Structures are given as structure tokens and as C-alpha cells.
Amino acid sequence: MPLKIVIAGAAGRMGAALLRAASADARFAIVGAVERDGSIPLGQDACGVAVTADLAAALTNADAFIDFTAPAATVAALPALARANVRTVIIGTTGFDAAQDAAIAAAAREHAIVKSGNFSLGVTLLSALVEDAARRLDPSWDIEIVELHHRRKVDAPSGTALLLGEAAARGRNVSLSAVRAPARDAATPGARKRGEIGFASLRGGGHVGRHEVMFAAEREILTLSHEALDRSVFADGALAAALWAADKPPGLYSVRDVLGL
Ligand code: NAD
């Protein structure tokens, strides 16, 4: 039996990649495609289903909900997911604040939720490597995370950069919030503090996403990096996560759980 999935953000860049990947894979049946009210293509056909803003109607009969939208939209969908008793929820949306993260964690008491700022295999392995390097290199090695994305991206640093920052902080046994360097601009002069993890975000053109984690010592620099060449890597990862989570108990999972890393 194919997994019956609903895709939210169906008219977006990731929505299009998910529709393309799922419709070409017999393990999935697309039973719903959701867009926000006022979005141009409502009613348009998306791989055999009409794009709708009626989330409750789209969720009738769904096994899994896959969300690549915007933080407020993801959180607003949670009560409908609970009412419809959807078993599996995949959240790829990035840019949540602490209250929104807490709402998702609470919803994980009812659904198996896989949430990640990056569903690619390469970045998932990169996060494990970054954690290991941070564990082995003492805080005299300055950690800086540099990311590049297309000009339309709205959140910064990217969800992936934060995920990598969290991995580095975990490797050093500290919380990222305790060591995250404040944004550097003319208003925040001063030298770098030992143990800080810094972020820099570049925006331009059409790049799908590049991330570099730099460990800089006085006389040598180690750089670990990843470059996504196509959005299909995130779509494939999200769909693999949906299959993996289909028989898991409620809880909040990461792609590292999916891959056993
Ligand atoms: P996008 O702007 O192209 O698409 C988002 C879509 O969501 C839009 O079509 C928008 O109309 C729709 N939307 C907004 N509110 C909605 C609502 N209430 N209900 C239904 N649809 C709604 O953006 P994108 O590039 O596809 O990225 C979407 C999100 O996924 C962003 O947060 C991005 O950072 C994230 N992302 C995550 C990964 C990952 O691997 N985790 C990869 C790429 C992008």
C-alpha cells in the first residue's frame, strides 16, 4: 500500500520538488496539495489532486503531512493535524522561534514528527562530522559557519547553519544559545571571544545552498563543507523520512535518527 501524503506549500520551490519526486515513486500516493489562501494556483491540478487552502479537507485519509512552508503556517496547521489524527509529520520549514519550536515539540506527543533544517544525506553526515571535530578540537579553535543561499531566502542564518552550529555546540558540551556570537556589524565592535560560534549569511543569485564550517586555529584552518546542487536531495530525504516514520511511535525525530547516525 502506498503511503498517502499531503504536501503543504505545494506551489513553492520545495513543494514542486516534492510533487515531482513523490509522483514518480510508487511508494507514495499524493492525496492532498495545500497552499495558502490567496496563492495563485488554488484549484490547479498538482499531480492528480486539486491544490486547496482547505487543510482539514486535504487531510481526510492522509497518512503523512509534509510541510515546507513558513513557520507561522506550520504552527497554524498543528491543530488540524491533531484533529485528523495524522500519524506522520515531516517538517522541513525553517526559521522557527522558541515558542514555535515548543508548539512542535508538544505536537510530537501525538505524531511521529521528523523535523530538520536540512533533509539531505550529505548535510546529515556533515553534522555528525562537525560534532566529532568540535569534540576533538579545544575552544582555541574558533568555529565560524558561513552559508550561501539564493536571493529569495527569507530567514538567516539558514536552518542548516543553525543545525550545524548546534552539532558543534553539542560536540563541545555547551548549548548553542550560550556560545552563539552576536551579529557582527559596525555597532558591535570588539574581538572574538574564546569558544564563540559565529555565523555569516550570504544571499544572492539562485544557489540552492552551500555551508562551510570553519575551525580556525592560529596557524591552521580545517574546513568542512557541503553544497546542494539540486532541491531534489531535500525532497528525496523528506520522502525517505516519511517512510521511516510511518511505523514509529509519537516523538520528535531528526534526520540523524532516520539514517541511524
Ligand atoms: P517557497 O517560498 O518557494 O515556498 C513556500 C510555499 O509555502 C509558498 O508557495 C507559499 O505560498 C506556501 N505557504 C505559505 N503559507 C502557507 C500556508 N498557510 N499553507 C500552505 N502553504 C503555504 O519556499 P521554499 O524554498 O520552497 O522553502 C520553504 C521552506 O522550506 C523554507 O522555510 C525553507 O527555508 C525550507 N527549506 C528547508 C529545506 C530542508 O531540507 N529542511 C530545504 C529547502 C528549503
Image: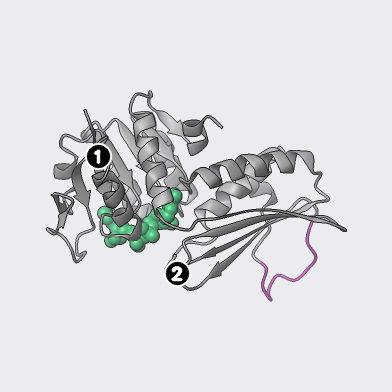
Whether residue 48 is visible, yes or no, is: yes
Q: Residue furthest right?
A: 219
Q: Image check: 45 left or right of 248? A: left
Total labels: the figure holds 2
Residue 206 shows which numbered tag? 2
Please name the residue shown 38% across and 44% down the image: 236
Q: Position of residue 239 (x, y in %)?
A: 35, 40
Q: Quadrant of residue 14?
A: bottom left
Q: Residue furthest bottom?
A: 186
Q: Position of residue 233 (x, y in %)?
A: 43, 49
Whether residue 93 is visible, yes or no, is: no
Circle 2: element type: loop
Which amino acid type is marked by label 2? Gly
Please name the residue shown 34% across and 47% down the image: 75
| Quadrant of the rendering where the N terminus is positioned | top left
Please name the residue shown 32% across and 44% down the image: 66
Picture layout, residue 258 above or below residue 164: above
Give the magenta part as a residue range: 184-193
Which amino acid type is marked by label 1? Ile
Q: Position of residue 87 (x, y in %)?
A: 29, 30
Q: Quadrant of residue 124?
A: top right
Circle 1: element type: strand
Q: Position of residue 237 (x, y in %)?
A: 42, 43
Please name the residue shown 56% across and 32% down the image: 261
Q: Quadrant of ligand 1?
A: bottom left
Asked whether the residues under the numbered discs 2 and 1 touch, taking CB atoms below 8 Å apart as contact, a structural biologist would say: no
Q: Check disc 1: other Cα within 10 Å, few if <14, some if 14-19, many if 20+.
A: many
Disc nearer the start of the sequence (2/1): 1
